[in-house]
Amino acid sequence: MHEENINSETKENDSIKPSNFIRDIIDEDLKINKNEGRVHTRFPPEPNGYLHIGHAKSICLNFGIARDYKGFCNLRFDDTNPAKEEVEYVDSIKEDIKWLGFDWGEREYYASDYFYKLYDFAVQLIKQGDAYVDSCSSEEIKELRGNPTEPGKEGPYRNRSVEENLDLFERMKNGEFPDGKHVLRAKGNLSSPNMNLRDSIMYRIRHAHHHRTGDKWCIYPMYDWAHGQSDSIEKITHSICTLEFENHRPLYDWYIEKLGIYHPQQIEFARLNLNYTIMSKRKLLELVEGKFVAGWDDPRMPTISAFRRRGYTPESIRTFAERVGVAKRDNIIDLALLEHTLREDLNKRAQRVMAVLRPLKVTITNYPDNLVEEMDAVNNPEDDLMGSRTIYFSKEIYIEQDDFMENPMKKFFRLSPGNEVRLRYAYIIKCDDVIKDENGNIIELKCSYDPETKSGSTASQRKVKGTIHWVSAKHAIEAEVRLYDRLFTDEDPGGHKDKDFKEFINPLSLEILSGCKLEPYLKDSNPGDRYQFERLGYFCADSKDSNKDKLVFNRTVTLKDTWAKISKG
């Protein structure tokens, strides 16, 4: 196979090697020159859905190890179930990995590349007496395997002759039998306390079109059969899996030892679990097919494509994966940590702009009718190199409805009748009059401004308790803004045995606001561009629906950072 050192687009700070038990194992292997000093990992997704944030941790781990040890990482699709696999999923997985900053070079493989080799391996096991064709029904097989406290029992087909097994297996391959008629099973140990060793199924008959091999095959290998042998064929040194495969390792070892082929080392680590989140691809598919969300990339989903569309950065996800670390036992990570990591990153890179999401018109009565002033606004106080931009001030402006209160509560330091507030980058204004419609709704404020308090002038040092954002009505552009929140109201929506996880869907997970007023600088925003809307949160132009004719912005994350408070406490 072609090999070249792994190429990563990640930044220098990503190349710092974090310590964990997997790296400790690799360090010890290198000390004794195990595998001739090679480090070769793989990321083996099943193309039956979109990747989620848990897969992002595995991607960062496998590709990161290969990068840091100057080794190799294969991308291998375990495409052994044609009924659930689609090219769409293959393409999305490749896009996600590249977006995260990793490149597999020419090391793109598929389990289907090895179907002939796997078939030959199976024939070898049959000839050795280590595999047989079983004609029992799935219910009978389940009953005969016993349970963790009772040993299994031999079925009526377990002792078929080698010749009969070879004949039946070949005929299975040739398509002579309907689905479910036969399976090929490993002849293991029916008394083993490990259920995986009790004659696990290796092949099942499935007359289904495969996205790569077409209709060539009528039998398909089970994941447990294809996985370890594929690792062996690719000469993987460290086969890194999540904990649910720990009990499967004895079966993988049994196959390798019976075949007498190269033996990769499997290492298990704890998968990523986030509160308020569902990680099961089956349940995520339920959300998509049931139209509870608008597709796999709906910004409320935990998929990588959804995080990308929502405005997350690949740097923030890589940093998050490093912070949660690599553990040996499952635990649940607070979603607030992911949001905190994102805020840290966006705070450094996102340009500040002003946007009014729920506009309230303000007329400044003592401001000249036709005057337009240009104000200088800082793009990002965290980065002087980002410079500044021009914003416009005129007689009529918009402010947020929430920034005015007719009967203010105590410590309300925004605008109210007779009180003053500073407009960001502009003047101090005072509310003189409140205009209402026939239903008593506030539709406009009449205010006056102090011309001596322009930002940057000496008089601007006059203090008021509140500063609010605004947009010039004459220059504002309109946009649709989608306010996304957590998809579930329960910390563990999938952990209730007596309730369906969909019962915990947050009815307020999406609010769509139309007629939002934005400063004109945003009119040329490209899909995916990220900003901080001052005082409101971080937003990005939607990658699918935003265009020059209609601007659509998604709220990426709010400004409030609960994790910082928790961690300091």
Image (cartoon, rainbow, N blue to C red):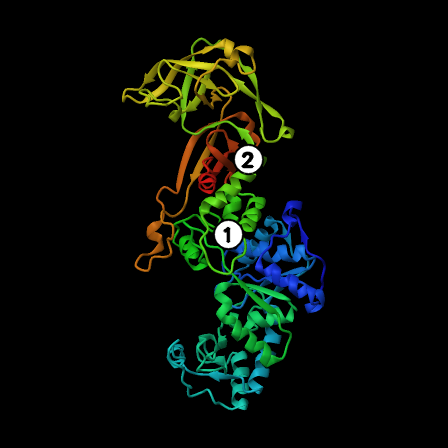
Q: Quadrant of the N terminus?
A: bottom right
Q: Quadrant of the C terminus?
A: top left
Residue 117 horizontal side relative to residue 271, left or right: right
Q: Which mark is residue 475?
A: none
Q: Is residue 70 visible?
A: yes
- Residue 484 on image: x %, y %: 43, 41
Q: Which mark is residue 347?
A: 2
Residue at the spot of label 1: 53
Mark 1 residue type: Ile
> Is residue 113 or residue 307 the one in the foreground?
307
Residue at the far left: name it.
Answer: 439
Instruction: Kindly identify the residue that appears in the image at 55 percent across and 65 percent down.
Output: 79
> Is residue 558 or residue 447 the one in the foreground?
558
Badge 1 local density, few (<14 within 10 Å), some, or many (20+)?
Answer: many
Q: Is residue 52 visible?
A: no
Instruction: Kindly identify the residue that appears in the image at 60 percent across and 52 percent down.
Output: 18
**Between marks 2 and 1 in the image, the one whose residue lies nearer the viewer:** 2
- Residue 104 on image: x %, y %: 65, 57
> Is residue 164 or residue 417 the one in the foreground?
417
- Residue 221 on image: x %, y %: 53, 73
Badge 2 local density, few (<14 within 10 Å), some, or many (20+)?
Answer: some
- Residue 341 on image: x %, y %: 52, 43
Q: In terms of secondary structure, where does tag 2 sit?
A: helix
| 295 w.r.t. 222: above or below | above
Q: In terms of secondary structure, where does tag 1 sit?
A: helix
Which one is earlier in the sequence, the residue at label 2 or at label 1? 1
- Cα distance in 3D space between marks 2 and 1: 22 Å
Residue at the far front: name it.
Answer: 569
Mark 2 residue type: Asn
| 39 w.r.t. 131: above or below | above
Instruction: Kindly identify the residue that appears in the image at 43 percent across and 56 percent down.
Output: 285
